Amino acid sequence: MPRERRNNHSLKELAENLRPIIVDENIPKDVREWLAKNGFDIVNVSEIHLRSGKDYAIAEYAARNGIAVITLDKDFALMYHMFQKGTLTIIIIRAKPATPANIIETLTAAQKRINLKEIRNKLVIITKKRIRIIS
């Protein structure tokens, strides 16, 4: 089992490095508010006229504009691998159950272990105990 890298980046540093970030519509309102309160420059899919849009359309928009996507939808991993590999930052949160409290707890734990230089244009899968970075 590979050893996880430990980093003490603050949420502010993470937010600055992922500016702006598209928040998929499956992210609960409480989590979106928490992200905004913690310095993330969030863009809801409805703000870019992609509400109820296909994952591919969201991924294509994000890649074209250099914007990261945060989602609960593991189908974005397929979008990353099939179409946008290396041109897009996708962050998938795997919190079970996917309640706002669990999602926030997962993000809080992850920010302490993420190496910010490693996640740009990568697929990042975050759980409470593990972070996978796929290029």
Image (cartoon, rainbow, N blue to C red):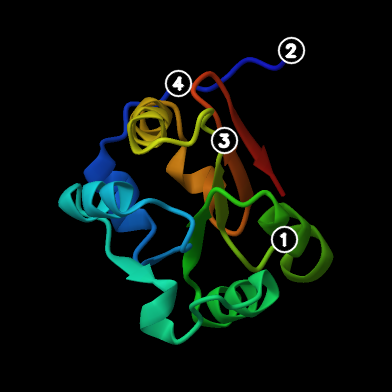
Residue at coordinates 72% horizontally, 49% vertically from top-left?
135
* Residue under label 4: 6
Mark 1 and mark 2: span between their CA atoms? 24 Å
Q: Is residue 56 left or right of residue 61?
A: right
Closest to the observer, 104 or 16: 104
Closest to the observer, 130 or 115: 130
> Quadrant location of the N terminus?
top right
**Mark 2: which amino acid?**
Met
Comes first in the chain, label 3 or label 1: 1
Mark 4 and mark 2: span between their CA atoms? 15 Å
Say what secondary structure mark 4 lies in.
loop
Q: Residues within 10 Å of mark 2 (few under 14, many from 20)?
A: few
Closest to the observer, 3 or 75: 75
Q: Residues within 10 Å of mark 3 (few under 14, many from 20)?
A: many
Q: Residues within 10 Å of mark 1 (few under 14, many from 20)?
A: many
Mark 4 and mark 3: span between their CA atoms? 20 Å
The image's mark for residue 94 is: 3
Q: Nearer the viewer, mark 4 or mark 1?
A: 1
Circles 3 and 2: CB distance less than 8 Å?
A: no
Mark 4 and mark 1: span between their CA atoms? 25 Å
* Residue under label 1: 80
**Mark 1: which amino acid?**
Tyr
Comes first in the chain, label 1 or label 2: 2
Residue at coordinates 56% horizontally, 81% vertically from top-left?
61
* Residue under label 2: 1
Q: Nearer the viewer, mark 3 or mark 1?
A: 3
In the rendered view, tell whether residue 35 sits above or below residue 23: above
Comes first in the chain, label 4 or label 2: 2
Closest to the observer, 134 or 72: 72
- Occupied quadrant, residue 83: bottom right
In the rendered view, tell whether residue 32 sits above or below residue 108: below
Circles 3 and 1: CB distance less than 8 Å?
A: no
